[in-house]
Amino acid sequence: MPDTKFSQFLTSQKIHVRRILAASYALESLTAEDRQIRLNKRRAKKAEGENVIKETRKPRSGRPVTERTMDAALSGGPLSGPVKTRILKAINHLLEQKKLEKIDLRALF
């Protein structure tokens, strides 16, 4: 495994890859509330002319970080912006549990 900023950060903070995968799954998986938000948006789009309450909340993506994306991140491979953000969310969640300060995206990639 090459020494990327991301892999160095994980070893310095003693964060295991499986914990990131589990945290991302818990943060990003769809809930009943997220499905309701999407349904309300579809209904509002269908009935544009009528008086319908617009949904302003954003649902979760429903796409957690996978092992393949973690392998790409650890080896320094190309990652899209949303994938980097999902990894960052999971890491910040783990750091919050350890009572450490959150980091920003530039510190990881």
Image (cartoon, rainbow, N blue to C red):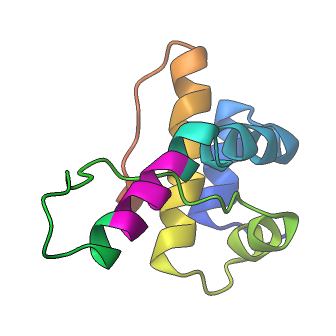
Q: Is residue 2 above or below residue 5?
A: below
Residue 109 can be seen, yes or no: no
Given residues 65 and 100, the one toward you in this image is 65
> Total of numbered circles in the picture?
0
Question: Which contiguous range is marked in magenta?
Answer: 36-43
Q: Position of residue 69 (x, y in %)?
A: 75, 72
Given residues 49 and 106, the one toward you in this image is 49
Q: Position of residue 34 (x, y in %)?
A: 53, 47
Quadrant housing the N terminus: bottom right
- Quadrant location of residue 44? bottom left
Q: Is residue 12 above or below residue 47?
A: above
Q: Is residue 73 above or below residue 8?
A: below
In percent of the image, x 82 and y 47: which residue is there?
17
Q: Is residue 82 left or right of residue 10?
A: left
- Quadrant location of residue 91? top right
In percent of the image, x 62 and y 40: which residue is there?
32
Q: Is residue 87 magenta?
A: no
Residue 92 can be seen, yes or no: yes
Q: Is residue 47 left or right of residue 39?
A: left
Q: Is residue 37 magenta?
A: yes
Q: Is residue 30 left or right of residue 50?
A: right
